[in-house]
Amino acid sequence: KAGVTQTPRYLIKTRGQQVTLSCSPISGHRSVSWYQQTPGQGLQFLFEYFSETQRNKGNFPGRFSGRQFSNSRSEMNVSTLELGDSALYLCASSFNEAGANTGELFFGEGSRLTVL
Amino acid sequence: DQQVKQNSPSLSVQEGRISILNCDYTNSMFDYFLWYKKYPAEGPTFLISISSIKDKNEDGRFTVFLNKSAKHLSLHIVPSQPGDSAVYFCAARDKAAGNKLTFGGGTRVLVKP
């Protein structure tokens, strides 16, 4: 069974630009969560989508947005990029709502964004 | 406000010895705790978990201990192997917040042969 797939794996943008990252969950999984990882900050929760609805949201500014499609694939968008947005963006999927049952999430390898 | 903290950013241990990773939390509504392991250039993978109604869970070389009164959990790896060298994240589930998972900052473990 294919794992969580994130594209692109690496990208470089400049300040003020916008970026769209894509995540394809494990087949059959209906929940997709997004996390930002920066050195020393661990994984900061961005948002979770379940059955095309945003179910939960972290404490990030409105420049960060996302959506989920009917096939459970998800995209996240960051507009007006800032230097501090440079990070590894991780997507995780689960069959039920994130955190349900044992709470286990299945992560992709991440998209590393560098903002110059 | 960091609700889940891993105060040791790094840990170095000799192969065959015990690795002890610590995690502290502040939110008493957390009801489930998980540990994830992350190798470079890979996504985190689930390692072991524990419910708040238990104080210990064991899986092979990995044991997680939970001290609810101290709001503290620890992960023990015995014996440590070079392949255990990775970053370990603890995470806590907040049932009152839609089961949202909050992660700690991670501890980088280096197991020396």
Image: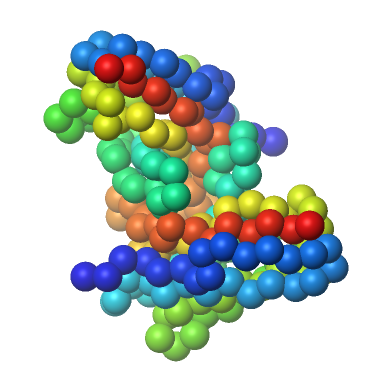
User: Is the image coloured rainbow, by chain, by secondary structure, or in one colour?
Assistant: rainbow
Number of residue marks: 0
- Tell me which residue sits at (80%, 71%) in the image: A17
Along the line of sight, the residue nearer the viewer: B13 or B7: B13
Residue in front for this viewpoint, B21 or B81: B81
Q: Quadrant of the N terminus of chain A?
A: bottom left
Q: Position of residue A41 (x, y in %)?
A: 62, 38
* Residue lying furthest bottom: A70
Is B98 placed above or below B16 here? below
Residue shown at 53%/70% (left/top)? A8
Viewer-proximal residue among A93 and A97: A93
What residue is shown at x 14% (from left), y 30% (from top)?
Answer: B60
Q: Is residue B64 visible?
A: no
Residue B39 % position (x, y): 39, 42
Give above or below for A25 relative to A105. below
Residue at the limit of the structure toward the right, as seen here: A16
Using the rendered image of the protein, determine whether residue A15 is visible from the camera's viewpoint: yes
- Residue A111 lies, in percent from the top left, at 54, 61
Q: Quadrant of the C terminus of chain A?
A: bottom right
Rendered location of residue A109, percent (x, y): 43, 57
When the figure is inspected, residue A113 is found, relative to residue A19, above or below; the finding is above
